Image: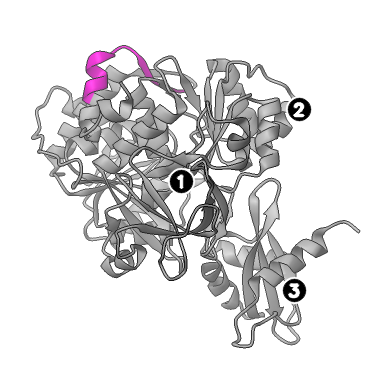
Amino acid sequence: MALIERFRGFNVASALATRATSDPGREFLRTSSDTFSYGVVDSHSDALAAALAHLGVEAGDRVALVLPVCPEFVVAMFAIAKLGAVTVPLDPRLTPTELQYMLRHSEAVCAVTVERAYGVDYLQLFEELFVRLPELQYLVTVGEEDLWYDDRIYQYGDLLSAGGGRDYATPHIDAAADLFAIVYTSGTTGKPKGVELSHRNLVTVAAGTADALGLVPDDVVVGVSALYSVFGLGPGILSTLLAGASLVLNDEPDASATLDLVAEHRATVHYGVPTTFVAELREQQRTPRDVSSLRLAMASGAPVSDDLVKRIRDVLCKTVLVAYSLTETSSTLCMSRPDDPEEKRVYTVGRPLPGTELRILERDGSELPVESVGEIAVKGPGVMLGYHRQPGETSTTFDANGYLLTGDLGIVDEDGYVHLVGRRKEVIIRAGFNVYPREVEARLVAHPAVREAAVVGVPDPLLGEATCACIVPEEGAIVTSQELVEWCRGTLAESKLPDLVRFHDALPRTGTGKVRRLELSRLIQTESRPA
C-alpha cells in the first residue's frame, strides 16, 4: 500500500506512534556518535511532552525551536505535536532583530535552543529577549551549563528525566484543521510571513514525496542541512519516518563532511540544494569517496540547471531527481520520479504529487492550454491554511477558485510534466534561500554614501543566483564594496548579503521611473564575461 494511503488522516504524533509500535528498534536518527531508534525518539518525546505540559504548555500554544541539526530538534518537534501545540522552527543563524520579530509575531510561550553555536551565546541572547517578549515564559536549553539562577530556564536533559513515566493530557487533533507548524518565509516586500501548516498538510506531502522517491526501510538519507525549513520538516524528518528509513543528521553541511557521511553510513538517498551538489562535485574530483551506495539524489530549493543534473548523474549518482517546492505547499509540489524518461528527469521538475491540482494561468486569471507560459497556481492537501495573522495577505494569494498563486512562471507539457521558466516575483533564490531586493536596498540606501540602490540576481555556477547590489553613490562620496557589505551585515542575515557590488553613474529606468532590473542583470553578466 502506498504511504499516502496508509497514513491518510494521521497527525504527526500518531504517525510516530504507529512507526514506534511496528518498528521500535529500527534506527531513525544517526549522528556522528550515536543512534536513536523509533522507540527511543517516541519515549523521549513522551517524556519531554509531559515535562512541558507540567510547565503549562497546552494545545494551541506556540513553541519555538531555535536549534541546529540535532536529535533534540526532532524529539522536541514530536513532543510539541503530542501536546497539540504548534512548532515554530526558526533558523538559529537569524539576527537578533529577526529572531525577536518572529518570536513576537508567533507569540511563542516557550523556546528550545542550544546554549552556544555559530559563535553565539544563546543564553545571553534569550536573557535579553525575555524583557522584550512578554509572551515568552520558558526557555529549554540543550547543553551542560548549570542554570539554577533562573527559574524560567530549564535544561533539556533535566526535563527528559523529570517527564519520564509521567502522564499528560493528549488532546484530540483534527489533522486537517489543527496547526502543526508556523514556518516563516519572506514575503514580496521582504518581510517575514508565517506560513500556517496543518498536520495533514505536512504528513500528506511527506508521504507523497516518500512514495515518489520509492523510500523503503533500508534507505539511509543524507543531506538535510536545515531542519527548521519546510523541506527539513517534511521530506527530511517526516518522509523518513513514514517510510521507516534512517536519517543521518549533520550540522556541518560542507561538501567534504557530507561526502564522508555518504561513505561512512553507506547512504542511499542524497537530498541537497544545487549549491551543495556543485561543491560536492568539486570535492569529489579532488578527493574521491566511495559513493557507490547512492541509488538516487534529489535536488530542490533553487533553480537546477540541465548541466548540473547531468554532472551529478555522471559523478555522484546515476538517478537524479528534481523537485519544485514551496513553503506554502508544505514543500514538494512537483517532482520527477526514478522511472520517468531520462529527458524528463533532466529538463523538467516532474509532475505534481497525487491529489495536487496544477493550473497555468494568464495574467487575467484564465487557464491556459498545455505548452503555454503562465503563472503556476495550485490546489491540494499540501496547500497552507494561510499566513499567520495576515488575512489580507492570505486572501490575495488565492484566486477566486481557491488556487494558490505561486508567482512562478511555468509550462505544463503534453505529457503532464512541469517546466519552470522564471519568477513573476523579484525574489532571488541564492543557494536555496530567498533574497528579496527591497529589503537589501532599504539597508543600502540608509548608508550616507549611497544615493540609489537596486539589487538584482545574476546566474552563478555555485549559488544558482548571486546577489548583485548596483549602487549610485552620493556626489563626492567615497565608499568601497566591502564597506557596503559590512554595513548590510549589521542587520541582514548572511544569506542576504550582496555577493557583488557594482557602482554606476545612474540606474536604467523606464518612462515611469521604475528601474529596469533585467537590463541591469544583463549588464552585470556582460561585464563579468571574459574578453
Element marked by disc 1: strand
Q: Which residue is mark 2?
A: 285
Tell me how the rendering is colored.
one colour
* Residue in view at x 47 percent, y 65 percent: 362
Q: Is residue 100 left or right of residue 120?
A: left
Is 472 above or below relative to 361?
below
Q: Residues within 10 Å of mark 2 (few under 14, many from 20)?
A: few
Q: Which residue is mark 3?
A: 503
Q: What amino acid is labelled 1 in the image?
A: Ser
Front of the two marks 3 and 1 = 1
**From which residue to which does the magenta span run?**
17-31
The N terminus lies in quadrant: top left
Say what secondary structure mark 3 lies in: strand
Q: Quadrant of residue 187?
A: bottom left
Q: Image point 46% across, 23% down: which residue? A: 31
Q: Residues within 10 Å of mark 1 (few under 14, many from 20)?
A: some
Label 2 – label 1 distance at C-alpha? 30 Å
Query: Reading the chain from its start, which is encountered first: label 2 or label 3?
Result: 2
The earlier-in-sequence mark between 3 and 1 is 1
User: Which x, y percent locates residue 167?
Assistant: 9, 28
Say the numbered circle drawn on residue 325. 1
Badge 3 density bin: few <14, some 14–19, many ≥20, Cα 10 Å: some
> In the image, what residue type sits under mark 3?
Phe
Residue 75, percent from left and from top: 30, 31
